[in-house]
């Protein structure tokens, strides 16, 4: 026999690993919806007919390498999703989703050790690959029954609303709320009869914290949404006149000072996250929308789509889309407007359920949403679930105190 001995790397276990030039490439093109990958191997992934979920090895050693290549240039249509199988990926644990959706892409990953785990060495989306897991539960809080209240109601991962939890912090109405930090929430601003700027943080187990003296202009009827994967933004509102200012919230729940807003000053609007890391403010006392980048920068006005109204709610659904719903437009309405994962607002969809205003909405179950509470001719506690395709269900008799001018946000990564 004769041959050439190729330079190879000795792993920490003493086993000789294939060099990057000597990966064991699969002779078969992978066309299935799942793949269990091995270390030091290469795979041609053909997603022409379906997406593919790839499970990485459950154990790895420093220097292990795996390469995935888009065989048919179809990842843009059917993406690959990588399950890191208990190991970190770019420093994030395996509760984070990892997908690649660029046609013609090749992804080469190398294991760096327990801290950072698998690191892409050659791909088109190194900085963006891991996306935060969606929240599983929700919380409605505050509002008015005719008198301001601070009660809250938790929503489980199946969309079931729990009974009242006694108020923590100052009772008020017309606050705003958003998720932050991946698994927590924040209520902010509102009125007790006087405008306030205080906030209340919500833990990953749904416990509402005591008042934190707010930063920024005291106001009511603002809106809030998550952005950047783990941060939040409050925007607009009313303090005797309409406002266009915003306040960013860090991933530890710290509210920043006022930023002079962009776009038309207005109140009684709503906001929602979309595209996994961006947000949109829309509707209210003027029918315009404003997109928010993944760094929290608010864009100029975009002419509104659909019937303008105020006192509406909004929430994310489907993992990367949003929905605005209900409100008041000379009378209560139940219409909705879906928001695509690129921030495009769709035309009116005739709503299902009781027309009402001054309600709130939050995501739950990872990819669904729920509208709750509000005012018809009096306060109500009914809810409407939203499927992961944006379909609104019929009324469900609510649990807890009927009230309006509430706020809601998602929390918890655990079902």
Image: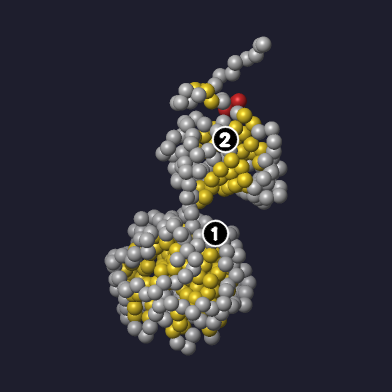
Q: Is residue 214 visible?
A: no
Percent across and percent down for residue 310 are 50, 78
Look at mark 1 in the image and give the residue it sits on.
Answer: 319
Please give left or right for residue 126 compared with residue 178 in the image.
right
Look at mark 2 in the image and give the residue it sits on.
Answer: 38
Percent across and percent down for residue 110 are 52, 34
The residue depicted at 42 percent of the width and 81 percent of the height is 402
Q: CA distance from mark 2 to mark 1?
A: 29 Å
Residue 159 vertical placement versus 2 (above, below)? below
The residue depicted at 68 percent of the width and 50 percent of the height is 50
- N-terminal of the pair, mark 2 or mark 1, is 2
What color scheme is it?
A: secondary structure
SS category of the residue bearing label 1: loop
Please give left or right for residue 76 compared with residue 309 in the image.
right
Q: Badge 1: how crowded within 10 Å, few (<14), some, or many (20+)?
A: many
Residue 142 vertical placement versus 29 (above, below)? below
Q: Which mark is residue 172?
A: none
State the image quarter where residue 40 is shown: top right
Residue 104 vertical placement versus 320 (above, below)? above
The residue depicted at 62 percent of the width and 74 percent of the height is 349
């Amino acid at each position: 026999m004769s041959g050439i001995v190729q330079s190879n790397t000795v792993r920490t276990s003493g086993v000789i690993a294939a060099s990057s030039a000597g990966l064991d490439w699969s002779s078969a093109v992978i066309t299935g919806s799942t793949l269990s990958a091995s270390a030091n191997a290469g795979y041609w992934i053909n997603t022409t007919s379906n997406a593919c979920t790839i499970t990485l090895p459950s154990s790895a050693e420093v220097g292990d390498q795996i390469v995935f290549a888009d065989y048919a240039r179809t990842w843009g249509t059917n993406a690959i999703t990588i399950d890191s199988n208990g190991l970190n990926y770019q420093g994030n644990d395996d509760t984070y989703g990892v997908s690649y959706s660029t046609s013609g892409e090749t992804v080469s990953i190398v294991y760096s050790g327990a801290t950072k785990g698998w690191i892409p060495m050659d791909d088109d989306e190194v900085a963006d690959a891991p996306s935060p897991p969606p929240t599983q539960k929700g919380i409605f809080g505050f509002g008015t029954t005719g008198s301001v209240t601070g009660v809250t109601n938790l929503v489980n991962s199946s969309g079931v609303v729990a009974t009242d939890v006694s108020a923590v912090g100052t009772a008020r109405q017309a606050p705003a709320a958003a998720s932050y930090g991946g698994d927590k929430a924040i209520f902010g601003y509102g009125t007790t009869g006087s405008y306030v700027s205080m906030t209340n943080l919500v833990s990953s187990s749904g416990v509402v914290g005591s008042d934190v003296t707010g930063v920024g202009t005291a106001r009511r009827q603002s809106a809030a949404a998550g952005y950047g994967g783990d941060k939040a933004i409050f925007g607009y509102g009313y303090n005797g006149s309409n406002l266009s200012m915003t306040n960013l919230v860090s991933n530890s729940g710290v509210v920043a000072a006022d930023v002079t807003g962009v776009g038309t000053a207005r109140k009684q609007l709503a906001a929602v996250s979309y595209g996994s890391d961006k947000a949109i403010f829309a509707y209210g006392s003027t029918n315009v929308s404003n997109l928010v980048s993944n760094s929290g920068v608010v864009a100029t006005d975009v002419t509104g789509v659909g019937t303008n109204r105020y006192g509406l709610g909004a929430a994310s659904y489907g993992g990367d889309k949003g929905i605005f719903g209900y409100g008041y437009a000379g009378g209560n309405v139940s219409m909705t407007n879906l928001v695509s994962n690129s921030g495009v607002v769709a035309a009116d969809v005739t709503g299902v359920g009781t027309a009402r205003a001054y309600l709130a909405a939050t995501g739950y179950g990872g990819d669904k949403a729920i509208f709750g509470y509000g005012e018809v001719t009096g306060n109500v506690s009914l809810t409407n679930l939203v499927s992961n395709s944006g379909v609104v269900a019929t009324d469900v008799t609510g649990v807890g105190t009927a009230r309006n001018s509430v706020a809601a946000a998602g929390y918890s990564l655990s079902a």
